[in-house]
Image (tube, helix red, strand yellow):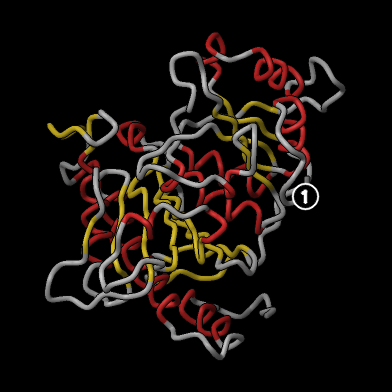
Amino acid sequence: MRHSDTSVVTIERYIIEQEQHYPQATGDLSAILYDLALAAKMITNRVRSAGLADVLGETTGINVHGETQQKLDVLAHNIIIKAMDHTGRLCAMASEESPDLIPIPDGFRTGKYALLFDPLDGSSNIDVNVPVGTIFSVLRKVSAGTHGTMADMLQPGRRQVAAGYVIYGSSTMLVYTTGQGVHGFTLDPTLGEFLLSHPDIRTPLCGRYLSVNDSYATGWEEPVRALMRHYRGLEGGHPALSVRYVGSLVADFHRNLLGGGIFAYAGNHDHPAGKLRLLYEVNPLAFIVEQAGGSATDGVQDVLDIVPHALHQRTPLFIGSADDVALARRLLGGPLAGAGA
């Protein structure tokens, strides 16, 4: 549905309009998106006041990945849980900051969806005021019984029914897909509402930017090194890409989604599977980029086809403009499958 340039479309209005195209819809998925938008507003307030409210810096806790938790990490994690656990729409949750499933508390109804999320991606950059974000993935419950199980979480990314991210930067923006295109909403702080600002986002077929951490180059296999030479225009005739790397996945992905480009996080000798978490980071962003005309691979297969075996599974990732990802598939030996490839 197209809206005039002068119309003001809140995220609630937009979701309701889209829901009307599906008479069988119960409204639960729409309500989950509303609840996540509310949580994003609450996290925005904490991020905006971080330097004044003693929520910068590290805690004494260590998360499941052996990383020191940031104070805002823990706050964002708790905000999302409290916004979602009582609604009756979820069977269980899982967070990058929690080692196990997060059950729905006794006394609350359970629902037919599972939520996985990274509460504050890029949190190591909080103290230096670099944009951070929240990433989320919604799956339909597949297990029997009322409460969620690991089977509900360990589903291939192709089974996602919704995914999105929120970037807390110079403005707060929420981007999501339910498999019908990608749409972006910017938070108007004077209204306290997310307003449609980027309808039907399409990422360019060929990119402008390369986002990669070159400090790992000495540990890359030769095919990955060759791929990076291609992206820099040093061989193979590929146009040279401008290197832009923030170190917050959401920020790098968001820039490349809008402007075109590729984010690359390859495995290395010490960490063959790379650093990124399949369920909390890779799958939701891969769902979004494919809906926007891009693509994502681990170098062997489309990441959305990976069958997960662990809640905190890691994977290499090459994600972005379709032609640039196709080059990664060709040089790294993966099939030329997937959107736009």
- Residue at x 15% of width, y 41% of height: 54
Front residue (pair 133, 88): 88
Q: Where residue 222 appears, x then y in whole percent?
A: 66, 12
Front residue (pair 104, 214): 104
**Residue farthest right in this picture:** 237
Q: Where residue 314 appears, x then y in whole percent?
A: 44, 35
Secondary structure beneath dot 1 equals loop
Above/below status of 139 relative to 293: below
- Residue at x 61% of width, y 86% of height: 21
Residue 329 relative to residue 284: left or right: right
Above/below status of 336 relative to 176: above
Above/below status of 6 relative to 239: below
Quadrant in which the C terminus appears: top right
How crowded pointer 1 is (Cα within 10 Å; few <14, some 14-19, many 20+) is rated as some
Residue 321 relative to residue 14: left or right: right
Front residue (pair 109, 75): 109
Q: Which residue is mark 1?
A: 340
- Residue at x 24% of width, y 58% of height: 79
Quadrant in which the N terminus appears: bottom right
**Residue farthest front in this picture:** 144
Residue 301 relative to residue 241: left or right: left
- Residue at x 77% of width, y 40% of height: 336
**Residue farthest top in this picture:** 218
Q: Amino acid at mark 1?
A: Gly
- The quadrant in which residue 96 appears is top left
Above/below status of 244 relative to 54: above
Q: Where residue 24 appears, x then y in whole percent?
A: 53, 88
Q: Where residue 308 appears, x then y in whole percent?
A: 45, 45
Q: How many marks?
A: 1
